[in-house]
Image: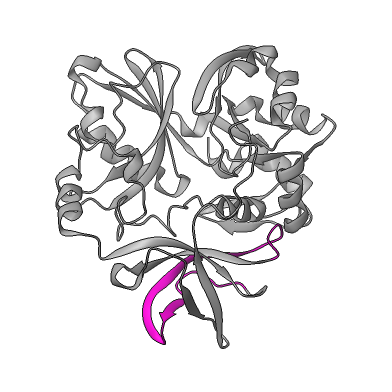
Amino acid sequence: MDAKNTPLYNEHVKLNALMAEFAGWNMPIHYGSIIEETKFTRTHTSVFDICHMGEFFVRENPEKSSLDKIITVPVVKMPVGKCRYGFLLNDNGTVIDDLIVYRLANDEWMIVVNASNEERDAKIISEKLSKDAKFVNKSSSTAKLDVQGPGSRTVMEKIAGAGIKNLKYFTFSKFDIYGGKYIISRTGYTGELGFEVYVDSDRAVKVWNDLLAIPGVKPAGLGARDILRLEAGLPLYGDEMTEDTTPLEACFERVLDLEKEFCGRQALINQKKKGLDKILVGFAVDGRRTPRHTNKILIGGREAGFVTSGVFSPHLNKGIGMGYINKGNTSAGAEEIEIVLDKGQVKARIEPLPFIKQTSIKN
């Protein structure tokens, strides 16, 4: 089924006449006010349509795992019921895509990838798997809805039952809902407590409507999602993650298992020994002006890097963002910088991530 013609997409056309092009798909940027949707997610519960994401299923003998050598995630070490964030890398260690892997059974995994990379990721992974492995791309038949916010656990109990309380951070289980056994995970991309619901695409509208019928639940679009993930200091493929950057430069060494073999590992080891030329940092602007992707960053009046993402944070009442700075220009403490906007320059300060520290994500 074409992702642009799913039942849930058609439902969005009815709900929201203002649609915008995002990452190659027609998806709602907002359902009303981006700022209000952002604030609502931090205080109540929002539902995000993320049906455009890609879902792959791999089955193979874990003792002879080829998947373990393709991606950075140590798939054979993962317990069943666990999910982990990781990367698909080139031989030179740069990011083809970031992804989340779920271990469904001793010999089966689900890989969730970005929509814009689905076809390429599927080709790369399937071609590198051993001939004994089974690869299935179920992206077109799988719908994904994200339920995010401090009230999301209570909301999910109404859909999936009391068993949802057993889900710890970055775990999942299969629940008997909507006439099938479907995966519900607890990861989140907003900095708040959150759950991901995976169902067959022909059930998506029913789940969407049922969630929105629960008091205290509203829809939120990709505009709010971008603000929320930036406030939480989380990267976006195409901005912070590209084939010009490595996980080390993006400050994600903590999720790498450099003890195991995977594509790009040696390049990362070499880079670590040599030292990084650039590093991802967070920054806050003095005022409400918003830096944008590719704006230049200056230190002492000299070009020192570039902005990857920038938004106005309604919770901090100022512009925030992330960007890469040449490693020689960073210091251990906060540092004053300037950002070149389309009209003039704005002062900013390097700040530790995440910008918002107290959230419900691990409650």
What is the count of numbered marks?
0
Question: Residue 60 sits in which quadrant?
Answer: top left
Q: Is residue 305 left or right of residue 176?
A: left
**Residue sitting at the far front:** 333
Q: Is residue 315 magenta?
A: yes
Q: Which residues are magenta?
A: 290-317
Query: Vertically, is 331 above or below 236?
Result: below
Name the residue at 31% across, 14% down.
Answer: 107
Front-most of 355 and 29? 355
Q: Position of residue 73 (x, y in %)?
A: 31, 33
Q: Is residue 67 magenta?
A: no
Query: Vertically, is 94 above or below 78?
Result: below
Q: Position of residue 121 (x, y in %)?
A: 34, 42
**Residue sitting at the far right:** 215
Question: Residue 181 sits in which quadrant?
Answer: top right
Name the residue at 31% across, 25% down.
Answer: 75
Query: Vertically, is 259 above or below 98?
Result: above
Q: Is residue 90 left or right of residue 105?
A: left
Front-most of 17 and 280? 280
